[in-house]
Amino acid sequence: MKRLNDARILMYSHDTFGLGHLRRCRTIAHALVDRYKGLSVLIISGSQIAGAFAFKARVDFVKIPSVIKLYSGEYTSISDHIDIHDTLRMRESLILETADLFRPDIFIVDKEPLGLQGEVEKTLVALKMKGCRTVLGLRDVMDSPELLEKEWNRKQVLPKIGSLYDDIWIYGPEDFWNPLKDLNVPKQVQEKSRYIGFLPREIPTNEHSKTDHSQGDYLLVTAGGGGDGADLMSMVLAAREHDRNLVYPLVLVPGPFMKTEQREEIHRRAKNLSHVSVIDFDSELEAVINKATAIIGMCGYNTFCEIISFDKPALFVPRTAPRQEQLIRATRAAELGLSKVLNADMAVDPALMADALHALPHAKKPSEASWHPKLEGLDQIEREVEKMLAHKLEITPDPTLDPVPLTHQA
């Protein structure tokens, strides 16, 4: 049994659009406290619904004021009465104060190297001066090289990554994608980078899901947080309306951030179709995915990890703006035979979408592809953390195991 005596890990999840960042941080945090006793993890999150998720013992979160990322890429405060600049100053101050009071041994920043509008830069400097290990976690795919280079050059991100971070973890295998592809990456950044592998998902042991899991055999349509998922839902419903021979049970999960009028329209259309149900939000979506026959999604990072973890056939209709992350991941996955992809300009045709839905229950599972995804990310992170905190590590015999008797010779 391994114990990391009074070890503390602070995680930062900026959470301006969707649920991907918080869910990724939560997955890592839960894996670490399961592995090591004596370890505490605190997640700084801007998510409006962080409190809707269950957290394991020794994992907690600090909520900072929420900021919404508009489809244009601009940011605005959650409240119309608070200026965005005031909100950002509050966030920056709360992050710095939380880090000062929590005194972490490791600080893990998810995806945004400097935080939203640079809000974690001061915290990174302060923690490094105190000997805290700083880690940047990057998705397998960030964006197209052109868009990422333009954004990062303007903020001088790569040189700052080199000076502010001790380690860079890439949450994917090297032979899937390079998130810094075609960028002029300094040697200092290259030397600190390590491919961790995809982050596997598990069915929650204490299920808080609202869905009846006793009945499976349905196609699941998930739009993640749902802020930009209305088009996907509409395309699938249009296919069902077009082709009445599509009778395979369908479950749609719009997500918590879909606009009210879009959600109401989805409910209205679903009621007019047989074997179609809508679940507005489920905080334990892993259990819903596990019971599904196949998945229709947009190919966000978490959804992709779930389909390969639970070995589900998948059809992806990725968004292409404001980022091309989903398009790149879905295209690469299709090339490797892990899933199917249908571009939005084709999926909007009800007949083409109907054909894809007819074929989906019989499509190959990821395990049947010639390329096998490496789902070792959490194990690798656990090993990395153990090396960083070796001075706090204590290994004790497991009291549940019987001791092995000594053999005495006459």
Image (cartoon, grey):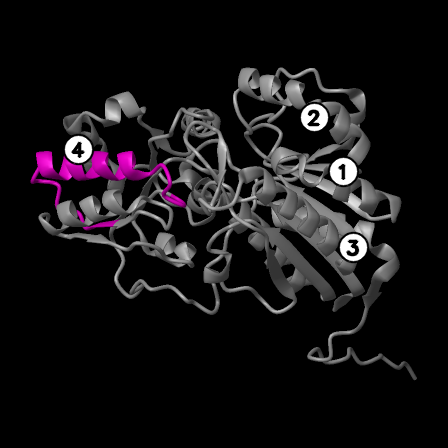
Which residue is under mark 4?
A: 354
Residue 151 rendering spot, x and y as whole percentages: 59, 21
- Confirm or deny contact between disc 3 and disc 1 (CB under 8 A): no
Q: State the residue lying farthest toward the bottom.
A: 410
Which region is colored magenta?
224-251
As measured in the structure, the alpha-carbon distance from the residue carrying label 2 to the one carrying label 1 is 15 Å
Tell which residue pokes out farthest to the right in this image: 410
Image quarter in which the C terminus is found: bottom right
Q: Nearer the viewer, mark 1 or mark 4?
A: 1
Label 1 with label 4: CB-CB less than 8 Å? no
Give the residue number, with chain letter if any, for mark 3.
100
Residue 54 x %, y %? 50, 64
Determine crowd level at label 4: few under 14, some 14-19, many 20+ residues with C-alpha closer than 10 A: many
Alpha carbon separation for disc pair 4 and 3: 55 Å
Is 211 magenta? The answer is no
Point out residue 196 in the picture as x, y percentages from the top left corner.
65, 40
Mark 2 belongs to which amino acid?
Val
Residue tagged 2 = 157
Please indicate whether residue 354 sits to the left or right of residue 84 in the image: left
Relative to 306, residue 178 above or below: above
Task: State how far apart marks 2 and 4 are (Cα).
Answer: 44 Å
Q: CA distance from mark 2 to mark 3?
A: 24 Å
Q: CA distance from mark 1 to mark 4?
A: 46 Å
Residue 240 is a magenta residue: yes
The mark found on residue 167 in the picture is 1
Mark 4 residue type? Ala
N-terminal of the pair, mark 2 or mark 4, is 2
Q: Nearer the viewer, mark 4 or mark 3?
A: 3
Q: Kindly report the distance in space between the C-alpha atoms of the residues bearing marks 3 and 1.
A: 21 Å
Residue type highlighted by circle 1:
Asp
What secondary structure is found at the residue carrying circle 4? helix
Q: Mark 2 against mark 3, which lies toward the viewer?
A: 3
